[in-house]
Amino acid sequence: MKIAAFIALAGAMCAAPALADTTVIHAGALVIDAESQPRGPSTITVTDGKIVSVADGFTAAPAQAVTVDLKDKTVVPGMVDLHVHLTGDPGGDFWKGAVEPDEWDVVVGAKNARLTALAGFTTVREAGSGPASAFSLRRGTAEGFIDGPRIVAAGPSLAIVGGHGDVSGFRPEVNELLDSGFTCTGAVECAEKVRLASQNGADIIKITATGGVLSQQGRGLEAHFTSAEMKSIADTAHSLGLKVMAHAHGARGIEAAARAGIDSIEHGTYLDEAAARAMKDNGTVLVPTLMAFKGVTERLGQGVYTPVVEDKILDVAETARVFMGKALRWGVPIAFGTDAGVFGHGRNAGEFALMVEQGMSHRDAFAAATTHAARVLGLENEIGRIAPGYSADLIAVEANPLDDTSTLENVDWVMVRGRVID
């Protein structure tokens, strides 16, 4: 009899629908997006990771829901950083690949994913990593095994042989051993590598369109890929439903990338008016990564970088303080990205002060890290706003960031996809 009763109870439990996971958040003030005026006391209801309602005032929570009291805080959308390297930390980058196993990247990435989320960045675009490390992190944060943001991952960057993004600085046999397999020469081979990246799980294609500051070459920062190669990369990626982000410093490399159909320019240091015009004409977005330049200059003279790299940092330092302001005046669309990993993760919000110093308003800077960044990712109907149907990516700060983005440097509470990260 007891066994029969147990079986009946178990059957009833299996037949009953699972209870929804609901959280009710009481916010003292609410910024639903960068375009709207702040609201007063509000209630946000989240069920199974999605926002289901936003109401004025403090409404009662349904039975069995969790209530979060943020009545003394301003709740705003979680921020987006379009350029991070979660699997890396600053300093000594050129030699680490020769001494550290690929698995260590995931350990470092798990640490940095948590720091990034706690800093208020609930979505990131991972802009180049080992063959599988960022993809493992992407799955780990999505499934809740690792505390961290939503990750849009590129995986290995496409580069020219011996260019920025390829292995260099070692003996030839070591360079060959460490080769990622994603270098290409000619339009056909470059198209093949885009397809290979897609096959292996890339959400976006990252290319190094010009030389770079931290690579072990003193050959300048102009175009690496030919225009035909970049067009092949862009056309192939777009045919697969993928966007392309291009590391690019030199003006002619930026211009060629924009004309080839590349979707975003990362860094853009030596942007000139002709390159800016090409970006505007083709809808190419600038991701300025101002914190990267700040981060590398902080480490000058400490033996962190080789003499070749130190010279390039010194050459680019002054331009880095003004180029985004020029882009702004020329009407280039700008979205938020930092290059975290070149500097310590968790300091991402320091980018806002640098953007404002170069002429951007606080409101526009906040938009660059929310609605504009979401649009760059093609996720504008999922993230970047607080509205029913959107992912529950929320943060709480002391004040209204539309008036002063410095408040975003101290985040008090974070929710990513409906999960609170303590």
Image (spheres, rainbow, N blue to C red):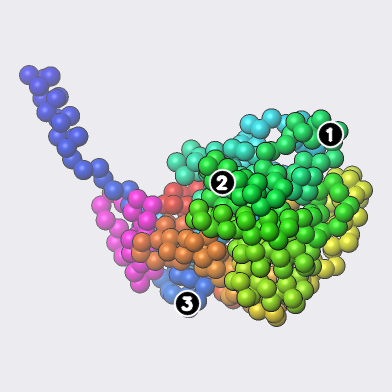
Given residues 214 and 66, the one toward you in this image is 214
Q: Which residue position is annotated with label 2? A: 195
Taking the image as shown, residue 100 lies to the left or right of residue 241, namely right
First in sequence, mark 3 or 2: give its number: 3
Q: In this orientation, does residue 99 appear?
A: yes
Q: Picture quarter containing residue 12?
A: top left
Per the model, the C-alpha gap separating discs 2 and 1 is 27 Å
Give the residue at x 15% y 31%.
11
- Looking at the picture, how far across and down is residue 156, in whole percent? 64, 44
- Marks 1 and 3: in contact by CB < 8 Å? no
Q: Is residue 186 left or right of residue 22?
A: right
| Residue 100 part of the magenta segment | no
The quadrant of the rendering that contains the N terminus is top left
Q: In 3D space, how far apart are the residues under numbered discs 3 and 2 (Cα atoms)?
A: 41 Å
Counting residues from the start of the chain, the first of labels 3 and 1 encountered is: 3
Crowding around mark 2 (Cα neighbors within 10 Å: few <14, some 14 to 19, many 20+) is: some
Position of residue 39 measured from the top left corner of the image (x, y, whole percent): 44, 75
* Label number found at residue 172: 1
Q: What stretch is highlighted in magenta?
A: 42-65
Question: Which residue in the structure is indicated by mark 3?
Answer: 36
Disc 3 versus disc 2: nearer the observer: 2
Q: Residues within 10 Å of mark 1 (few under 14, many from 20)?
A: few
Marks 3 and 1, Cα distance to the nearest angstrom? 56 Å
